[in-house]
Image: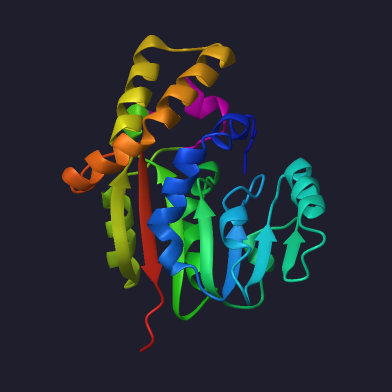
Amino acid sequence: MKYLGWELEFFDKANNYRKYQFDLMKKYIKQSILEVGPGNGIIMDKYIYESNLDIVLLETDKRLFEKISNKFESKNNVKVYNSKIDTVTRKFKTILYLDVIEHIENHEEEILKAYSKLENDGYLIVMVPSYQHLYSNYDAEVGHYRRFNKKFFKDLTKKNNIQCEKLIYFDCIGYFFLLTNKIVKLKKRKNFSYGTKVWNFLIPFSKILDKLLMHSFGKSLLCIYKKADY
């Protein structure tokens, strides 16, 4: 998995966006949690204080692994490993891939491996960047293999006979920011930093528009699979 991670410096400061991400999925976060590619652990900060949670973090980037290991070393209910999904031998109620699948070349195989690690009635939560036509030099620089649309997840659902609980686009204002970025080809990180601050400020408006437009498009895509209890 190619992952450079410098973009985390900007996105982790985008508090409005991180809160929006969490709000969209928080009701699906259950007792035992596996988060793959937690980065700096920013999303985890929002759910770690819930009671009785059993949390496992998998981070393949050694620098980030060391960072989150130090960050959560005092938490007895949190275990951090420098490894991949293949090493997991137990099952979970919730598995999270938040802006991670796009960094993995064999993304379909990864999703199916993760799905197999769910307990009955468990949820696999996947957030990815949307629309391949938005793919830019930025995507290539941060190690994205591709961007996604609903069809990918619908086809995966049908082909593997798995249950999709939720499938929506979100952050419609962010879509236009990325489209503009692709057209003008911002190269300097200070310009990217400024654009990120403006975009984060507009997230509350994006949330309102997303609802009005029924989540019909956006810069990101949320898919939630459920492990049915047959």
Q: Quadrant of residue 89?
A: bottom right
| Image quarter (top left, top right, bottom left or bottom right) of the C terminus | bottom left
Rendered residue at 32%/44% (across/down): 170
Rendered residue at 42%/29% (across/down): 201
Q: Is residue 24 above or below residue 119?
A: above
Left or right of residue 43: residue 225:
left
Residue 174 image position (x, y, % from top left): 35, 31
Left or right of residue 53: residue 109:
left
Q: Identify which residue, 210 or 6, lies in the foreground.
A: 210
Q: Is residue 110 above or below residue 148?
A: below
Judge whether residue 140 is colored magenta: yes
Residue 84 image position (x, y, % from top left): 66, 58
Residue 95 image position (x, y, % from top left): 53, 65
Q: Is residue 176 above or below residue 87?
A: above
Q: Identify which residue, 222 or 194, lies in the foreground.
A: 194
Rendered residue at 58%/77% (across/down): 91
**Residue 45 appears in the figure:** yes
Identify the residue at the far bottom of this view. Answer: 230
Judge whether residue 120 is colored magenta: no
Residue 71 image position (x, y, % from top left): 77, 51
Left or right of residue 16: residue 53:
right
Which segment did they paint magenta? 135-145
**Residue 136 appears in the figure:** no
